Image (spheres, grey):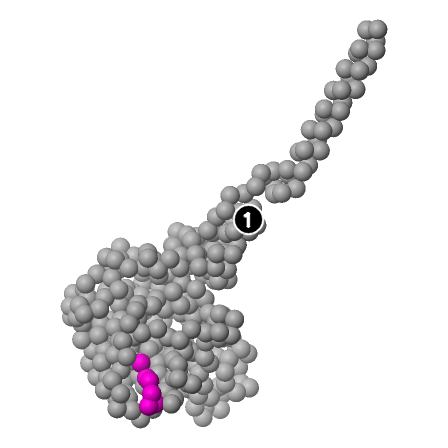
Amino acid sequence: MRASVLVAFASALLASVACSDSSSDAVSSSGSSGTEPPASSSGTSGSAGTSGSSGGASGSSGTSGSSGSSGSSGGSDAGPDGGGGRDYSANKAAFFGASRCAGAGLTLCDDFESGTLDKTTWSVVGTAPVIDGLQHARGTKALHITMNGNGASYIKETKTFPAAKNTYWGRVFVWFDALPVAPMTYSHWTFGAATGTGVQGEIRLSGQLQNGANHFGVGTDSGQSATGTGDWTSSDKDPANAPLAVPTKQWVCIEWLHKGDTNETKFYWDAVEHASLATTTTKHGGNANPFILPQFTAMWVGWQEYQPSTEKFEMWLDEVAVDATRIGCIL
């Protein structure tokens, strides 16, 4: 009798252990920790992740479905595109407010809060802009450019060059108040560019009016140079070949990378990369020559429009920044 009881007890115990092992396997198959990882904005989220700024090494949280589809939040990280701890979120509510240049620790950051243009940093090309408080992304002032008809009005700096590895990141907040419109049927305009030695022409941040809408673009104007790629502009095709028109009467944050050591460029709008505007030696809008970047010596921001016009073009720029690593729209 006792033997029967002991055998029954042992059998029950073994069954219990088997059930426990089976449950453990089922849980551990959902992730390395054996528990469902919490949703996280840093995961492998959409466009911010493509910049490296989402720190793809987040591992288990990156597999959590809901965070992977966010696409609009970059989070804080030390990814390969930027420095440790910088916030590359695309949350526009966090872009604005008080000026942040003073504590940013960037190679260059100008908030225009002094009310006068810093002539130790900037030189003026074309019509002189003014600094006022009519619009401002941060603080109380911004650089104001007004052009009646085509031509140039921009500020240019050389003090951040030469850059290590011939590479730099730029960031600027832009308010377009009046862009080319009908009766113009076509217009090509530039709001930022870099130049240097060894290669003819500008490396441009631009836009084009086509089919009644303005879209961002990138390009160059190496013209008839035998080794250049010609005079071309590639237009934005993001997202998914349904690009948004360049907005007016609101602030946008534009970032760009000019990576001269590998001849690559990137373009970000409100902290989201627009991959259709990325260029390499072979991916560009020009001729069959490789797209080679110059040894950068200067960078400018402002306005230049190339087609004959009597229209009024107007914009504001704020918190212009340059650094060796990605800056983002929060810093």
Q: Is residue 165 magenta?
A: no
Residue 217 spot, x, y in % from top left: 42, 78
Q: Is the magenta stretch mostly helix, strand or loop?
A: loop
> Is residue 147 found left or right of 46 in the rendered image?
left
Q: Nearer the viewer, residue 265 or 7?
A: 7
Q: Tag 1, which secondary structure?
A: loop
Q: What stretch is highlighted in magenta?
A: 179-184
* Residue type indicated by callout 1: Ser
Task: Identify the residue shown where x is 25% and y is 58%.
Answer: 97
Furthest residue to the top? 1
Q: Which of 216 and 121 is in front in this view?
A: 216
Q: Is residue 202 above or below residue 3?
A: below
Residue 100 spot, x, y in % from top left: 26, 58
> Is residue 142 found left or right of 30 in the rendered image?
left
Task: Identify the residue shown where x is 34% and y is 68%.
Answer: 252
Task: Identify the residue shown where x is 18% and y is 75%.
Answer: 130
